Amino acid sequence: MSNLKRTPLFDSYAKYGAKTIDFGGWELPVQFSSIGQEHEAVRTKAGLFDVSHMGEVDVKGESALEYLQRVTTNDVSKLAVGQAQYSVLCYPDGGTVDDLLVYKYADDHYLLVINAGNIDKDFAWLEEHLIPGVTIENISPQTAQIAIQGPLAESILQKLTATDLSKIGFFRFERDVEVAGISALVSRTGYTGEDGFEIYLPAERAAELWDALLEAGKEDGLLPCGLGARDTLRFEAKLPLYGQELSKDITPIEAGIGFAVKVDKEVPFIGQEVLKAQKENGAPRKLVGIEMIDRGIPRTHYPVYVGEELVGEVTTGTQSPTLKKNVGLALVKSEHAALGTQLEVEIRGKRLKAEVVAAPFYKRPKN
């Protein structure tokens, strides 16, 4: 796998027993101990993820707000300094370029966090739509990102910083936080359905912080976690993965993230007409939860039928580690999206019974 890209933490993987895979051109850990153990650690204690493959784009200039209002679906004007926002980049036909986070540093300065496999495509798209008075820079290579997630994430991270983390609200962040003697951006965000933080720091300090966090969390059961658990965790929480629940052929309305699409904001944005029509009149397809009635595990791209009609396909499916049930997310024609609808999933040439159920499959208990 020598031609694959590696994160600044690659050399740390081996001492923690990582098994690596090719993930969108990156050599990343799929697991350290086991996917099940890592999943449970995040749901009950805490897990640590190397997310340094994600992309970061710095956006600066007097026209930065107007620019982001044009290229993203959410309303950036509603952000306060120190606040983050989930958003989407769309094509004119409403299909998805990528989903992303927007961090507001100042009225004329923002950070965009984009998906690893889309960095080059997204940056080209952002460049293509530049307006005067704004500059963008891909700062991904010099930026590392480490996520600590789970009910004990705050107490573990608090051991390494004097900043009161309880004062950083959900989707809020602080810059220049000293963590284990390293200056970092600390954001209360994540991709697991649990409480937790994402920490952005200079790439050359990543290994130092990784080791310090694992040491600080040792007694609390903090485990290093790979992509396998990241996927089962985000899936249970119905958080979309680009390339599965989102793509150039799937709109954010179809994918169930219409909350991040503000069709009436003051500045017109790319894809607005199609997305507005879908919000008002309903989208042709809808992302739903499915549970298998027959024995079998639904997997990505497995066809979904109602009678003899092909009505959609599975986007993600697994045996849910939390529910211990075979469940999936499927993009189906909207007329077959009602709860309780009986479906069949074609698994290895056999059509097996399933039904539409409520999703997300997991919601974290409120304290």
Image (cartoon, rainbow, N blue to C red):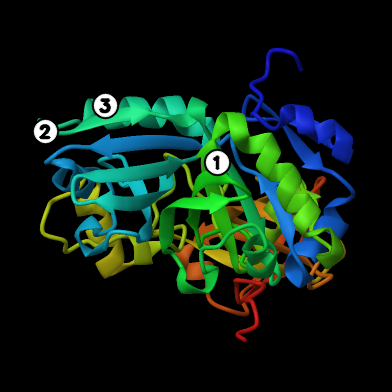
Q: Which mark is residue 133?
A: 2
SS at circle 3 = helix
The image position of residue 191, as x and y in percent, is: 58, 57
| Quadrant of the frame with the N terminus | top right
The image position of residue 167, as x and y in percent, is: 46, 73
Locate residue 295 relative to residue 264 in the image: left or right.
Answer: right
Locate residue 104 relative to residue 1 in the image: left or right.
Answer: left
Count of labels shown?
3
Q: Toward the viewer: 134 or 206?
A: 206
Q: Toward the viewer: 332 or 9?
A: 9
Mark 2 and mark 1 lie on one chain; the one further toward the N terminus is: 2
| Quadrant of the frame with the C terminus | bottom right
Mark 1 and mark 3 lie on one chain; the one further toward the N terminus is: 3
Q: Is residue 327 above or below residue 349?
A: below
Q: Which mark is residue 243?
A: 1
Q: Toward the viewer: 120 or 173?
A: 173
Locate residue 159 relative to residue 130 in the image: left or right.
Answer: right
SS at circle 1 = loop
SS at circle 2 = loop
Q: Residues within 10 Å of mark 3 (few under 14, many from 20)?
A: few
Q: Which mark is residue 225?
A: none
Please report the residue visible at 60 percent of the width from the left and 71 percent of the height from the top: 360
Please report the residue visible at 56 percent of the width from the left and 66 percent of the height from the top: 288
Residue type at tag 1: Gly
Q: Is residue 297 above or below residue 335?
A: above
Please report the residue visible at 28 percent of the width from the left and 37 percent of the height from the top: 59
